[in-house]
Image: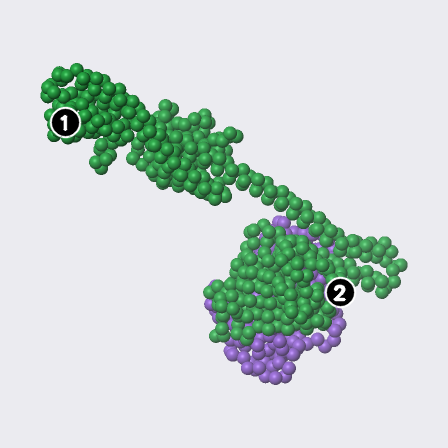
Chain colours: A purple, B green
Amino acid sequence: MRDTAGGTDVENSGGLRILVVDDEKTIRRFLKAALNSKGISVIEASDGEQGVYIALNSHPDAVILDLGLPDMDGIDIVKKIRESSVVPIIILSVRNDESDKIAALDAGADDYLTKPFNAGELLARIRTIMRRLAPRQDGPVYKTGTLEVDITQHAVTVKGKTVKLSPVEFDIIKMLVMNYGKVLTHKRILKEIWGKNEEPEDALHLLRVTISNIRNKIEPDPNRPEHILTEPGVGYRLFEE
Amino acid sequence: MENSFLNRIKGKEFIFSTLLVAFVTVIGSFFRGIIDASNFAVLFLLAVVLSALWWGMASSVFTAFFGVLAFDFFLVPPYNSFSVSDLKYIYTFVGFIITGVIVSMVASRARRQAIETKQREARTAVLYRFSNEMAECETTPQVIGAVRKNVGELLGCSTAVFMPHKDGISDAGSDADFPLDTHEYAVAQWAFSNKKPAGSGTTTLSAAKAFYVPLETSLEAVGVLGIRTADGRVIFNTSEMELVTALANQSSVAIQRAVLTEKSREMELAKKTQALQAALLNSISHDLRTPLVSITGALSALSQDFEAVDAADRKELLQTAYDDSLHLNEIVGNILDMTRVESGNLKLNVRPCDLRDLIGASLTQLKDKLEGRMVAVDIPGDLLEVPVDFSLMMRVFINLIDNAAKYSPAGSEIYIGAKTEGNMAVMTVKDSGFGIPSGDLEHIFDKFFRAVKPRQVSGTGLGLSICRGIVEAHGGKIWARNNTESGAVFFIRLPLGDAGHGGRD
């Protein structure tokens, strides 16, 4: 997770094959140009059926999927792919449709980008996903900025200072760290941490309180969080520098 | 009870007259033979006058003739016989009859006039109150309600009002006990189409359960008034009929006035909407074109002869195009928000939200724009949960904070605060910029309004009206004020609902 040199990731992502599923030709063209310039080769699909077929048969390293395809519901595409593949999926969606984003994430998508987005943002997301999947070299210790989390030792330090977290708080940090760069929906956190299958208001309240408490302990300025970011109406993500 | 029994007997006034004559005769009989019989004529004349005043012309003429007979029989010698001993009594009788008839005529006319005056007064009072009440009504349903209430009270009946609807008429309000079946509808429809009263008590379709009077003005038929008396009585008497007609006339005018007012209001609204839409299109196309011009310009320069442009200029051109495309995206976002707010079907996904989180997320989104800015955030340590739609309320804060940054000098401080006041959360966004001209304070939340530009400030003039739309959809209030020192302060007040102050667990 630690960047040794600025250029490494770009070089690391070289040789990757990414499937772009979008019905808009201009968007495919722009994505192709942006990704090719980083040495990533692009496979294009212009509809959902073709997309699912290529995703399952050509084994791309990642899928960029537009949620608004004319032939198939984006969420169904995610489900179809997830039936037999763990390939990372990044969703492209428009503003104001949180429920679609949540549904796609809960169906197994890894991340989402809101259109319009810039190439840098997209590459950063791809890089993060690739690094999460790559074999780890720095052991059970995760580091991002001033935050350090040692999974096996249950130890969290900020700027070298040890922070005391309750077991639940640590579980949430651990979950965020293990899924860094990934958006965790409220539903998923409630299920994994509290074993809830639904989202009752008291459980959501507990989640907000816990996140607020963690921020008070680990954020340099809890009013403007840098580590645990809120995805409006969707969930949380651990920001990674 | 007794009164109504007597009321039903026809010619009861003749019985009263008879009794009165008998009474006068009994009194006279006490003085029989003591005073001269012709003096009794005065007593009988009194009876005639009283009959005329109390019971009318017919009864007083009856009193005069019957009185003469009783006078002759009991009080004029020879007693208990119609024969007359002295011829002078014949003159008395004739004089009495003539006087009696004249007095009857005069007195009964006076009585009739008095009665009419009283009735007219009563009706005028009723109609006056009715028209006053009508004048206070603004909408058609209000007018119909008032018509039904008044007619129902005045006539002691249940009512229904029918209004034109498509090809026929439809019930525009009726009492629960008003008989409304297809037959009654048909009668009402007939009254409406033929502009004539129909139903019970008329010669047309008289089998109907209720009486239907068309409501018409000089212009058109505006509806039908259905009346059904409480005791099922079929026929109204003349004065009731007159009252019904008068009420129907006033109702028609009032209904037509309301209908016309509504129509003109609708037309005005349509006109206004049209004007607004035109203004919207105007403003939007201008706002969209400005960044587009620079994007197309920059890109066309590059695509025409890429090599000829030197590297630094290339970067400059691309950066311009990129910046303006972001701006374009913002405008489109604002227009979308505005459409959502305006269309009235803004779907709120209201959930308790951590206010600090909400403001934090807004600041994160504005990170680039707030580069180099001091942003002070003052939120009480306790978790402050407000029931809002997180994403929509973020739009509000993003707009306000972005505005604060736009309208204040680079590097100056922006202050964001939140606190609870009773059952409300009050949030403030304060800048130390140029402030808002005091005359504009009321208008800044209007669509397309933009305060005087201190410098090149871009925007659609939609941001604040979007904010207002969203805040009001949450049952809250948004307003602005100028700081005492410098800059503007925006306030948002939102109900805490029962989410309350979450407090720490």
Q: Label 2 neighbourhood size at 10 Å, few (<14), some (14-19), many (20+)?
A: some
Disc 1 residue type (three-letter): Ile
Q: Is residue B322 something that shows in the picture?
A: no
Q: Residue B400 carries which label?
A: none
Q: Which residue lies furthest to the right in this view?
A: B308
Secondary structure at numbered mark 2: loop
Q: Chain ID for label 1? A: B
Tell if the residue under mark 2 belongs to the same chain as the one under mark 1.
no
Q: In this view, does B83 lie to the left or right of B462?
A: left
Q: Is residue A23 left or right of residue A165?
A: right
Q: In this view, does A49 lie above or below A152?
A: above
Q: Which mark is residue B35?
A: 1
Residue B65 percent location from the top left of the image = 21, 21
Secondary structure at numbered mark 1: loop
Q: Is residue B98 something that shows in the picture?
A: yes
Distance CA(mark 2)–CA(mark 1): 144 Å
| Residue B128 or residue A83, whichever sits in front | B128
Residue occupying the point 79% across, 56% down: B294
Picture quarter with the N terminus of chain B: top left
Q: Chain ID for label 2? A: A
Residue B3 percent location from the top left of the image = 23, 35
Q: Is residue B316 left or right of residue A197?
A: right
